Image (spheres, grey):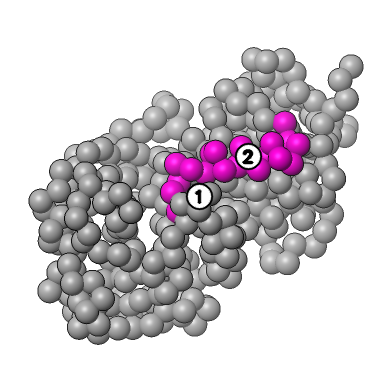
Amino acid sequence: MTRPWDIAVVGGGIMGCATALGLAEGGMRVVVLDKGDLCQGASGVNAGTLSLQIKRVSLMDYALRGHELWEAMGDAVGFRKTGGYTLAFTPREAALLEERQTLKRAAGAPITFVSPKAVWAAEPGIADSVVAASYCPEDGYANSSLTGAYYRARLTEAGIAVRVRCPVEGVEASAGSFALATPDGPVRAARLLLAGGAWLAPLAAMLGVDLPVRARVNTVSVTEAMPALFSTVIGHATGLLTMKQKPNGTVLIGGGWQGRGTPDAGRGQVSADTLAPNVALACHAVPALQDARLLRSWTGFEANVPDFYPLAGALGGVEGAYVLGCVRGGFTIGPYLGRLMADLILGRAPERPLFDPNRSFEGDT
């Protein structure tokens, strides 16, 4: 009989891959399984924004470390540190901006408040209706479509087995081992990490565990190539807009506007009802965008639980099983959470606390 793996990682997104790398560095024999291909889910279809200005205050320490890891990845993932402006166009938005960014600055993000004149001096293409703004020099972006190739190369270099288009159809747990049923045959491992993103709930259900995982259906759009319009990451005080212009001139527009669909049904669908205001807000911020053609819009599933904190830790009641996922801002924070998770599984003390997946969600909405 084939020797069991030390651990099977189910889910080949950023968090699963980052954890697998840390485990292999710690001496474990690791296999990564994904029902599609590496980083084809949320990890590969998001807008790629790496902005501290849109991160939760309580997760700022994790986001700061995540930024450092993305910068170290460099050109391999299309990393660019451009700085970023968050804009307010009304007094109400300005008050919201001040409240939110003051808290984030106190949490360690190098955010400053700047005048509209300073914004226009740096970014002449920004609308003249700006009334307040904040700036963070650490903000930037990476190319999410490159993450799969990046992690495939890293996993191969580390000697980690990768099985793509290999969905896990069932899991049997017995003392000290797991047997995973797949179309390519059974996979046996001493430990198991579930890192399946929006598909975490059905995976955990195979072990008799009910995780209250929900999924947002975030929309992203890209324009045709345009002349240089702006050079930094642009956001809005409400959090409903992120934009960056790539070196090829295309403009990527996000902001968490919701499409339709569920993970169980497969891909999500773009909704015209939410796409239109997303694009309208982008054109309000940068008026010259009104002349651009929108080439494509798509959706990606972002998993969350009711309190919107990550699931990261041992899965209660199932010895040797762990779960990692449901991270708002997971593109930024994922590589770092993967490192912390690897330390936990290897028996080391993670340098920052993880997030008990067995906590109570009663009272959360």
Q: Name the residue under label 2.
A: 153
Q: Distance between the residues labelled 1 and 2?
A: 12 Å
Read off the magenta span.
Answer: 142-161
Q: Does the magenta run of residues contain 153?
A: yes
Question: Residue 193: percent from the left, percent from the top?
Answer: 70, 40
Q: Name the residue under label 1.
A: 77
Seen in the picture, residue 11 relative to 98 is either above or below; the reply is above
- In the drawing, what numbered circle is on residue 46? none
Q: Which residue is drawn at 59% across and 60% down?
A: 72
Q: Is residue 358 visible?
A: no
Quadrant of the image occupied by residue 151: top right
Question: Residue 262: percent from the left, percent from the top?
Answer: 41, 33
Q: Which residue is drawn at 74% across and 41% down?
A: 158
In the image, taking residue 190 as reference, residue 231 lies left or right, namely left
Quadrant of the image occupied by residue 237: bottom left
**For the residue carrying disc 1, how many other residues have a C-alpha within 10 Å: few (<14), some (14-19), or many (20+)?**
many
Q: Which of the two discs, 1 and 2, labels the residue nearer the N terminus?
A: 1
In the image, taking residue 59 as reference, residue 101 lies left or right, namely left
Amino acid type of disc 2? Ala
